[in-house]
Image (cartoon, rainbow, N blue to C red):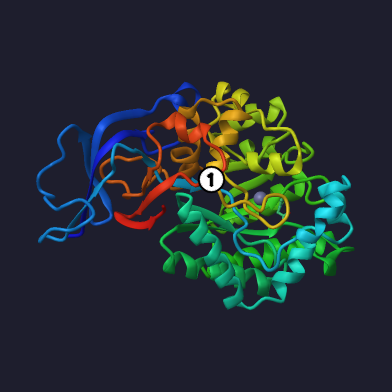
Amino acid sequence: MAALLVKNIGMLATPEGRSAKRGKEQGRIRILRNAWILCEDGLIAGLGEGEAPALCGGTPGGGDASGCEVIDAGGRLVTPGLVDAHTHLIFGGWRQYEMEQKLKGVPYLDILASGGGILSTVRATRSATEDELYDKAKQALDEMLSFGTTTCEAKSGYGLDEETELRMLRVIKRLNEDHPIDLVSTFLGAHALPPEYKDDREGFISLLCDKAIPEVANQGLAEYCDVFCEKGVFTAEETRRILLAGQRCGLKSKIHADEIEAIGGSQLAGEIGAVSAEHLIVCPDEGIESMAKGGTAACLLPATSFYLGASFAPARKMIDAGVAVAMATDFNPGSCPCLNMQFVINLGCLRYKLTPEEVLTAVTLNGAAACGRAESRGSIEPGKLADFIIWDAPDLNYICYRLGSNLAWQVVKSGIAVKKNG
Ligand code: IZC
Ligand code: ZN
């Protein structure tokens, strides 16, 4: 049996449960001091305070005869591994050449409307091979792991043709098999209207609903279907049509809603039982109400607000209304080229004004719930995956307060110490 004992943990901070935490519950977490965690066969076998169990008698950093590894955490903080529930992980090229336009104040949607933005990444992605996309995304995953991400959602959406979309989804599948980070796959065929269909919206939407979605579902290449519901991209009615076609094929719904303009995406999310609505920067009260009623999680992306110089989503209002709030990076080559969930933690406190406890739940258990994984991860509890971070930090406040350093000292994925920093 592969076992790992982590002892001498100064503070262990974790939410508890197997579903999203809403309202006041989002800020209620379990704190253990002078704690230990025992992992067996990739799962949490036990945890507690005080003297660690004797069955793992090895020396710190080494192993004993039974193959049990022991890590001395040296009084550090331990939290669950971070769940990054919204990323555009797979793409060709970058968009650094748009910097000049951005600095001149050209809006994100204007860059897209003139054939740049997402469409420029579509050109670069279409011309990349499967192996090129794989290698590039693998490098991103390595960096995410070093920052403490142990599960991430990954979207397609830079192909906008069947061949390239399937290639992107195959890359996600391969990386899920090969890389320590677990991936959750989302089909985002409705990310923009491709140039070939610029005068035929109906043709493109029919292609998605009647051909691409059934094919993706048939090949088992995605668990979620997502739409960029935004002014000048897809309307709320088009979004409804595409997501319901996905639901008929067994794909659960996510929506890019209220990022720049509120055109009904968050209301729709609650109505059709979307698992999550994402962005929600300009989410209206009716959207919050609808999500609370429909049990839709709000997946907020504060690093994107930061990067676009936009306002920040009304996170407190959402928590007060009983909406489960998750937070993720939105890693993508345009509006947020950031892989670092630790920056998201900082912004959750400093800009959303959430408490460190609420932020911890947002980036672990509620992130897991936003991509359908709360049963198996997002908290440190017996039976869950042994995914956690030993931080170069004495307590939870510290990781919210420090800015710009990588504070993940040791990342443990499925009971294996996979990344040692410093
Ligand atoms: O490439 O700009 N918002 N999609 C919707 C994005 C941002 C990604 C991009
Ligand atoms: Zn996105």
Could you say where residue 227 lies in the image, as x and y percent from the top left? Answer: 69, 52
Identify the residue under disc 1. Answer: 341
Could you say where residue 233 lies in the image, as x and y percent from the top left? Answer: 80, 51
Nearer the observer, 281 or 209: 281
Nearer the observer, 189 or 87: 87
Residue 112 shows up from this direction: yes
When asked about the image quadrant of residue 115, the answer is bottom right
Residue 221 shows up from this direction: no
Identify whether 307 is placed above or below 295: below
Nearer the observer, 200 or 313: 313
Q: Is residue 96 left or right of residue 28?
A: right
The N terminus lies in quadrant: bottom left
Q: Amino acid at mark 1?
A: Met
Q: Is residue 34 left or right of residue 404?
A: left
* Residue appearing at x 42%, y 68% in the figure: 177
Q: Residues within 10 Å of mark 1 (few under 14, many from 20)?
A: many
Could you say where residue 240 lies in the image, as x and y percent from the top left? Answer: 70, 47
* Residue appearing at x 74%, y 37% in the figure: 264
